[in-house]
Image: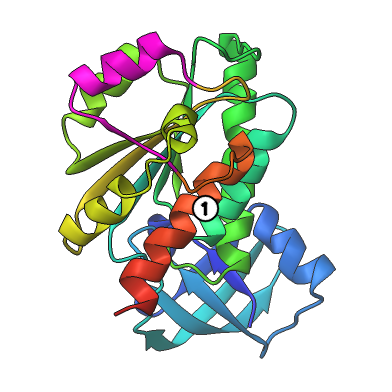
Amino acid sequence: MQRYFIPESNMSENQIKIDGEDVKHIYKVMRMTPGDHIICCSDDGRSAICRIEEVEPDFINAVPIEWLEEKKKLPVHVTIVQGMPKGDKLETVVQKGTELGADQFIPFKAERSVVKWDDQKSSKKVLRLRKIAKEAAEQSHRTTIPDIYEPYTISTLIELGKYYDHKLIAFEEEAKAGESARLVQTLHEANVNERFMIVFGPEGGLSENEVNRLKEAGFSSCGLGPRILRTETAAMYVLAVISYHFELMG
């Protein structure tokens, strides 16, 4: 059943109004008509099976017929901090990371990031990433859409890190040295609903200066197995490990 995310202001217990791009998708792409069923999700994670009642060019009215109790979120909250990579790699991280359960994505202005965004470009990029996250959340049947932030500097990242329970750095030098225990140890020490922040470098990795500053702020560096992963693969690896530990082992 097709899933759509609806602003809280458009949802009530008895009526749901759908507007914007979703109208085009429901009406022209899916060719739905009154009587068809969809799933509508609110900003706060509620979801309901709804029956379409009225289809107009600019809006669709639907009626909730069954509110669902869905458990789709990871048991812990994960923020992916991605050193800004080249090309469309950040889009891949957001799309696949959304499918794997990340709650937030923060692009990071790393020292070795080749890509630079000015204010205008940044706004357009973030809007694009938010659209990708919404579509990936619908496809993977999530009940919430991850937050996508404007790019952070290392100083703003360290300040935000104060509010997290577990802070990790995926550092390839640790992998080269054979470190393989810290990620597993952190997961064993973590409790349900705790907050993880995990920092990944761009193509050239994180600099020693960045790693040292993060460590001084309470971050721990870890390896991700014996192989060196591409920047767009590393976050997927960690999210899969977290899902295995909290969702499959349980």
Q: Kindly identify the residue that appears in the image at 63 percent across and 83 percent down.
A: 1
Say left or right for 22 vs 245.
Answer: right
Between 216 and 6, the one lying in front of the other is 216
Assess whether residue 209 is covered by the magenta stretch.
yes
Q: Which residue is mark 1?
A: 237
| Viewer can see residue 205 | yes
Q: Kindly identify the residue that appears in the image at 58 percent across and 19 percent down.
A: 122
Assess whether residue 134 is covered by the magenta stretch.
no
| Viewer can see residue 101 | no
- Percent across and percent down for residue 159 are 22, 21
- Percent across and percent down for residue 240 are 48, 61
- Percent across and percent down for residue 65 are 45, 90
Label 1 Cα crowd, 10 Å radius (few <14 / some 14-19 / many 20+): some
Between 38 and 134, the one lying in front of the other is 134
Q: Kindly identify the residue that appears in the image at 32 percent across and 22 percent down.
A: 157
Question: Over which residues does the magenta segment extend?
Answer: 206-223
Which quadrant would residue 35 be assigned to in this image? bottom right
Q: Amino acid at mark 1?
A: Tyr
- Percent across and percent down for residue 59 are 64, 62
